[in-house]
């Protein structure tokens, strides 16, 4: 018997704004992503020094996750899986890594950059912060794919692989950035359907 799942909460980050469940919680008038994400980190009152060593994609995913998970206790393992997607993979970091390889000033590429040359590393940063030991997957699509995310998430929940799923779209490429992340479980205000996911994403 199939269970109807729901979206507990959702967060959207783009155009220098952070939106939680349709409400604007942060708006910062700055020119660059780097300035914006640092101000957003402080405005949301996140305290995690390792944040400043992360790559741009991980910072975006981390802030979005903190908006949804930051109020939950961190001293226990939570049964929350992560399912993310984007279109640029880790291209921004890949470019920086390639520059260190090409540069005659560097004989060895920087390990601090190389560690972020996989897009799923952002899920690792979230998992470490929130002590998540459940399944995680990162998919690459040409565009936001509500149908695939819906089907994959429902499969995890129906097969009792996890109690909740943090899923969505985390894309960063140069100054082009966008995050849409939502938490799915058995209870919530919004029905977990492809139509509702798409509607919330396009708001």
Image (cartoon, rainbow, N blue to C red):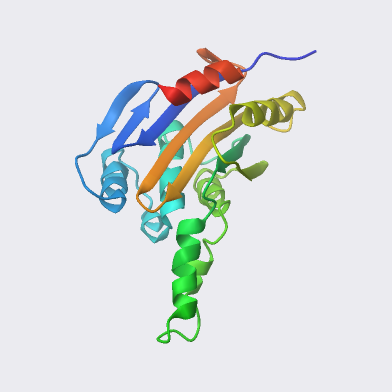
Residue 10, above or below 186: below
Task: Write the residue at 30% across / 34% down.
Answer: 17
Q: Looking at this view, is 70 or 86 the one in front?
A: 86
Percent across and percent down for residue 199 are: 48, 18
Q: Is residue 111 above or below residue 184?
A: below
Left/right of residue 20 with respect to residue 138 in the rendered view: left
Number of numbered callouts drawn: 0
Could you say which is closer to the camera, residue 118 or residue 74?
118
Q: Horizontally, is 5 left or right of 21 in the view?
A: right
In this orientation, does residue 192 appear?
no
Question: Would residue 163 appear left or right of 41 to someone viewing this image?
Answer: right
Q: Could you say which is closer to the camera, residue 34 or residue 81?
A: 34
For residue 1, above or below residue 121: above
| Residue 180, percent from left and from top | 46, 33
Which residue is drawn at the image coordinates 59% and 43% (left, top)? 132
Quadrant where the N terminus lies?
A: top right
| Image quarter (top left, top right, bottom left or bottom right) of the C terminus | top left
x%, y% of residue 59?
41, 50
Q: Is residue 148 visible?
A: yes
Q: Nearer the viewer, residue 27 or 172?
A: 172
Q: Position of residue 87 (x, y in %)?
A: 54, 45
Q: Name above or below for residue 168 compared with residue 22.
A: below
């Amino acid at each position: 018997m199939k269970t109807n799942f729901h979206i507990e909460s959702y967060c959207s980050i783009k155009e220098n704004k952070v939106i939680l469940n349709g409400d604007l919680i942060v708006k910062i008038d700055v020119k660059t992503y780097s300035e914006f994400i640092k101000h957003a980190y402080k405005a949301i009152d996140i305290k995690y020094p390792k944040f400043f060593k992360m790559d741009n994609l991980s910072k975006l995913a981390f802030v979005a996750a903190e908006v949804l998970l930051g109020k939950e206790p961190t001293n226990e393992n939570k049964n929350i899986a992560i399912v993310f997607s984007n279109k640029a993979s880790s291209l921004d970091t890949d470019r920086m890594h390639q520059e260190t390889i090409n540069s005659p000033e560097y004989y060895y590429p920087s390990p601090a950059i190389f560690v972020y040359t996989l897009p799923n590393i952002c899920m690792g940063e979230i998992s470490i912060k929130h002590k998540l030991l459940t399944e995680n997957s990162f998919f690459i699509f040409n565009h936001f794919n509500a149908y695939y995310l819906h089907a994959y998430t429902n499969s995890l929940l129906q097969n009792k692989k996890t109690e909740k799923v943090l899923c969505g779209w985390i894309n960063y490429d140069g100054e082009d950035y966008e995050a849409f992340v939502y938490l799915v479980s058995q209870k919530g205000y919004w029905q977990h359907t492809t139509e509702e996911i798409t509607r919330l994403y396009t708001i």
